[in-house]
Image (spheres, grey):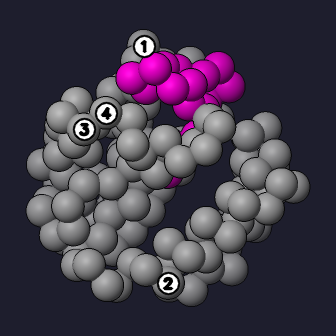
Amino acid sequence: MVETVKNWEEAVRLASLPLLKSGNISDEYVDNMIDSVNKNGPYMVLSDYFALMHARPGQGVKKLGMSLLVLKHETDLRGKPVKIFLVLAATDNQSHLESLQQIMGIFMDDGSYRSILTGNRPAIVNLFDGLEK
């Protein structure tokens, strides 16, 4: 859990760091996510405090992956308050769909969602550990 960020762009960059370090994505993908919000608005904010950050599959993506950043204090993403930034990097239009369905199941469960919002790292790791790779 991170206390606070300057803005949503910094949050996206922080959330992307694990994928950058592992080589799953390049800086191009991070820039594409930010550009997409700047061009299209906050459509990636799917529910209260939750943004599913992504860009076009394949562009700057070397390997399927996801990373999560939870903020203690919300940041404004173009008029929407966000505490949870989940970065999804897909290599194509199909390979990530099963993982995405499983992720959304986690976020739709009220108890799981609250565990994520509180930044309870062991609980969060446990929630995502069971996902199909």
Identify which residue, 51 or 128, lies in the foreground: 51
Tag 3: amino acid: Asn
**What distance separates the C-alpha of mark 3 from that of mark 4?**
4 Å
Residue at 53 percent across and 48 percent down: it is 46
- Which of the two discs, 1 and 4, sits closer to the camera? 4
Q: Which of marks 1 and 4 is nearer the N terminus?
A: 1
Give the number of the disc on residue 40. 3
Q: What stretch is highlighted in magenta?
A: 70-86
The residue indicated by pointer 2 is 98
Is residue 121 shown in magenta?
A: no
Badge 3 element: helix
Q: In this view, does 83 lie above or below 84?
A: above
**What distance separates the C-alpha of mark 1 from that of mark 4?**
19 Å
Contact between marks 3 and 4 (CB within 8 A): the answer is yes
Locate residue 119, reporting x and y percent: 73, 40
Badge 2 element: helix
Q: Which of marks 3 and 1 is nearer the N terminus?
A: 1
Give the number of the disc on residue 120. none
On-image quarter of the N terminus? top right
Residue at 83 percent across and 54 percent down: it is 110
Locate residue 56, reporting x and y percent: 20, 61
Give the number of the disc on residue 41. 4
Locate residue 3, reporting x and y percent: 62, 21
Tag 4: amino acid: Gly
Judge left or right: residue 133 versus residue 129: left
Badge 1 element: loop
Tag 2: amino acid: Glu
Pointer 2: residues within 10 angstroms few (<14), some, or many (20+)? few
Judge left or right: residue 26 versus residue 53: left
Residue at 25 percent across and 55 percent down: it is 55
Badge 4 element: loop
